[in-house]
Image (tube, grey):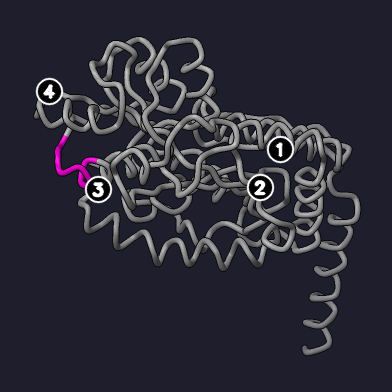
């Protein structure tokens, strides 16, 4: 009986090795759990193109938005663990969602880490017609319009939602929260003047600032952005200590064979080392993680630390899906 078990285990190992040896032998689907036009979508498409070249295989990008990204993440968590369905997610879809939604999967246990990509802060922005010219004036305007001021976000549990709630608490003044299906929609809303305030990414906001479509008041980081040197930090603008950044990473379904995970990680590292890709990401105000932090093991450790840090904060703030 023991010999039979050993033979079966050997056959299974050989089959897994064979699958890994010829992987990828067909197109890969890369799931973006948010809508088209936001930073997650843009970053995912850059990563997909780089990994396509590294793996010599087609990578099809598919957007599955809704429920703060949990629909798309769930699709990957429940997919076959064969390396042909991969996920580019971020802090909101893969950490915050675990504290906000009742999920039919575990964000920390049902996905296999591949590697970290990059991190970015937010910019605090408003519609162009709002009567404020700096952050202190914006905060004064919000306080003068209790119950009337509106703040958009990219969906319940998204980084712009959680950071938006924390921003309201930091200035001690509530605003009406208006959720959208993704950053693309919330961005359109701030440009068209449908909402008053939004925490949005530099990649999107700086182009809109140049076009006069919005006002930008501060970056939620300790240092100014190289791509936006004229925008003050929250410390400089009058809201000291208010920092918020969110990161992106790659995952596959749990139990994906390690050789396949290693191939995907190698392709990701090659992509992030490519000068042209790096320049594009840096141009989007992304801070690329160093190679030592791009490993599956580093992402696994990091996401557990993030959950331990943020889940209590989110729950204490009363942020939940209704």
Along the viewing direction, whichever of 320 and 126 lies nearer the viewer:
126
Residue located 67% across and 43% down the image:
85
Q: Secondary structure at mark 3?
A: loop
Upstream in the sequence, badge 1 or badge 3? 1
Along the viewing direction, whichever of 145 and 22 lies nearer the viewer:
145
Residue range (magenta)? 168-174
The reply to whether dot 4 and dot 3 touch (C-beta < 8 Å) is no
Along the viewing direction, whichever of 118 and 76 lies nearer the viewer:
118
Cα distance in 3D space between marks 4 and 2: 39 Å
Give residue 148's mark. 4
Along the horizontal axis of the image, is 87 left or right of 280?
Answer: left
Whether residue 173 appears in magenta in the rendering, the answer is: yes
Judging by the rendered image, the residue that carries numbered circle 3 is: 319
Residue located 57% across and 56% down the image:
111
Q: Residues within 10 Å of mark 2 (few under 14, many from 20)?
A: many
Judging by the rendered image, the residue that carries numbered circle 2 is: 288
The quadrant in which the C terminus is found is top left
Task: Please determine whether, in this image, residue 53 is positioned above or below residue 247.
Answer: above
Along the horizontal axis of the image, is 278 left or right of 321?
Answer: right
Cα distance in 3D space between marks 1 and 2: 12 Å
Give residue 47's mark. 1
Q: Position of residue 278 (x, y in %)?
A: 74, 39
């Amino acid at each position: 009986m023991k010999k039979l078990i050993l033979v079966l285990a050997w056959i299974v190992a050989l089959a897994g090795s064979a699958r890994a040896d010829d992987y990828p032998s067909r197109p890969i689907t890369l799931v973006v759990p948010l809508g088209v036009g936001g930073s997650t979508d843009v970053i995912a498409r850059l990563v997909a193109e780089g990994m396509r070249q590294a793996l010599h295989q087609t990578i099809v990008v598919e957007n599955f938005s809704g429920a703060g990204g949990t629909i798309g993440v769930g699709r990957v968590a429940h997919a076959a663990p064969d390396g042909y369905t991969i996920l580019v997610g971020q802090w909101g879809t893969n950490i915050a969602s675990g504290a906000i939604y009742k999920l039919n999967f575990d964000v920390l246990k049902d996905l296999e880490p591949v590697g970290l990509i990059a991190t970015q802060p937010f910019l605090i922005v408003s519609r162009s017609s709002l009567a404020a010219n700096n952050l202190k004036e914006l905060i004064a305007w919000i306080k003068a319009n209790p119950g009337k001021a509106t703040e958009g976000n990219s969906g319940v549990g998204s980084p712009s939602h959680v950071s938006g709630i924390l921003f309201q608490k930091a200035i001690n003044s509530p605003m009406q929260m208006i959720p959208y299906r993704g950053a693309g929609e919330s961005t359109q809303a701030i440009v068209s003047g449908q909402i008053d305030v939004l925490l949005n990414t530099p990649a999107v906001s700086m182009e809109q600032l140049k076009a006069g479509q919005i006002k930008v008041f501060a970056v939620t980081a300790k240092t100014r952005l190289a791509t936006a040197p004229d925008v003050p930090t929250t410390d400089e603008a009058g809201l000291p200590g208010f920092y918020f950044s969110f990161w992106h990473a790659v995952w596959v379904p749990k139990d994906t064979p390690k050789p396949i995970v290693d191939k995907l990680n190698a392709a990701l590292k090659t992509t992030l080392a490519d000068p042209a890709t790096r320049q594009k990401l840096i141009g989007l105000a992304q801070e690329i993680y160093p190679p030592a932090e791009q490993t599956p093991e580093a992402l696994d450790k990091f996401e557990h630390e993030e959950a331990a840090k943020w889940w209590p904060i989110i729950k204490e703030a009363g942020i939940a899906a209704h």
